[in-house]
Amino acid sequence: MTLAEAQDLFAALVTGERPVDPASREGLLVGDAGLSASDRVLIYSDMYLFRLVDALREDYPLLARLLGDEEFFSVCSAYVRAHPSRDPSLARLGTALPGFLRERAGARADAGDLGALEWARAEAFVAPDAGPLDEAALRSLGEDAASARLVLVPSVRLLSLGYDAAAVWADLDGARDPGPPRPGPASLLVWRKGFEVFHAPVSPEELAALSAVRRGATLGEACEVFATLPDPAAAALDALASWSGEGLIARIDR
Amino acid sequence: MAFQRAHLGHGIGLRSKHYGRFLDERPDVGWIEAISENFIGVGGRPLAVLEKVRRDFPVVLHGVSLSIGSVDPLDRRHLDGLRALADRIQPAYVSDHLCWGTHRGRYLHDLMPLPYTEEALGHVVRRVQQVQDALQRQILLENVSSYVAFRGSTMPEWEFVAQVAERADCGILLDVNNVQVSARNHGFDPREYLLAIPPERVGQFHLAGHSDRGAYLFDTHDAPVADAVWDLYAAAVRRFGRVPALLEWDEHLPELERLVEESHAAAAVEARALTAREAA
């Protein structure tokens, strides 16, 4: 048996995703009176699933609390079968879990949105360092402001959700019963200031402006989304002051 | 061809539960081991902690996802990230495991044992050389705990480990606990294992706790070092001399003081074994 064949067979035994007949297993592995080949494989296959679910529980502690141990394990087992890990870091395993939850029949309706918030916070916590830009640099833009392109710090995450995940997050974080799902559009901004991660609701217009900035729009283009508001200039200036004050801007590309 | 052993003393692992302590204090240990994958491409508090620790101590970068024995291609993006981290941290060593953990592009996040065959040996040796070229430095490979043995193996584990190190010109991270665990699980003499390992290749030891599950020992890193492992560590020091040793503890992680205490216990075992070695 070649090395490739041995690894194919052993991976199938460990993940349980492809049936392996007992004769092939016995041909691959040696057992003894104390521990048969199949008992030995079980040590690995049990560890495989538990390790992955434990890693997900570390990144999604509040989702785990919301769903309960049994449901969380069941969801995560299905998830790791559908989304095998493609990253050397176990901390990246959960990247597609929020989307998976949104599509999973029978899951609590706001589970995906709570997951999206937890994942965004986890990503923001370890995002690469940058900036933030000195407020004076922003003020010095003057007449060039409309054509300037802002670069956001890498920790910024923008969430457009269908449920009030921030309220569920706050309840679970405070060890309170979150009650039933609360539907309704919610725009959330997640970012890191120093070592601390924050999230806060923003208006849909501000979220759209930040999205445009992230896509590389000029400040003038990004602020066009405020045009429908009663005082567009004031809204744009408020938003800019808030971005600057919260350290969301890494640099200005002119 | 040789491996350059560093002189670091006794160290402990950097775990997130202790990040705050490491930012504020300098625990009484010789060096710190950080898990490479936790720090590749990240910023924020984890990186700030690692950089503070690096200012205070020699650091070893220890990986879990190199998958040196897999038939999958080496993950070049991971290697680039590891190289960038090593350039930034300037570790005393870069190490990983003599095992495989990827299959058809999937990370299994486990340390799977290899069949000990000529084919696997040649495969691993070629890949170690590729990794050392990419990182521009020698690496150390750690023997893993194992629970299965492949029917196709044509040599014992200790011969495979020694051959990889000699032919690929890399170092050996000898995990004394893993030798003990695998010896029990496969019915070999752990001292025979030590005798087959070339002393000049051993750059580091690992020490850890395990669980006795009756039919087998399980490598859990969740308890103090077992008496049998202390005895084997003393035998290893008598054979290999003064080697940097790391106390590993992952599950049920105690307070920092307990880890420091356990690393001091390791230093005491080493001192006694060195005295015995000199007397012999």
Image (cartoon, coloured by chain):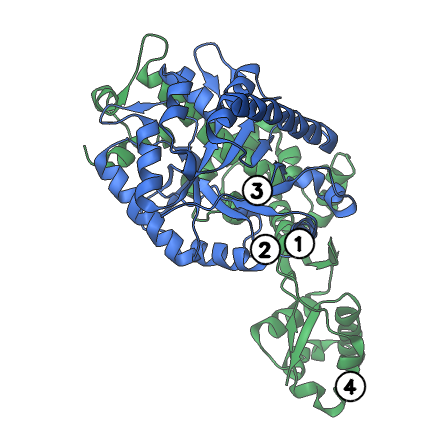
Mark 1, residue position: B51
Height in image: B181 above or below B9?
Answer: above
Distance Cα–Cα, label 1 vs label 4? 34 Å
- Mark 2 or 3, which is nearer the eye? 3
- Give the residue at mark 2: B89
Q: How many numbered dots are placed on residues in this image?
A: 4
* Snapshot quadrant of residue A146: bottom right
Query: Disc 2 to disc 3, how far (Cα)?
Result: 18 Å
- Please, what secondary structure does the residue beneath circle 3 have? loop
Residue occupying the far bottom of the picture? A143
Disc 1 versus disc 3: nearer the observer: 3
* Image mark 3: chain: B
Q: Position of residue B224 (x, y in %)?
A: 62, 21
The residue located at (63%, 60%) in the rendering is A157
Give the image quarter of residue A63: top right
Mark found first going from the N terminus, 1 or 3: 3
Q: Colour of chain A?
A: green
Q: Colour of chain B?
A: blue
Q: Quadrant of the C terminus of chain A?
A: bottom right
Kind of residue sitting beneath label 1: Glu
Circle 4 residue: A140
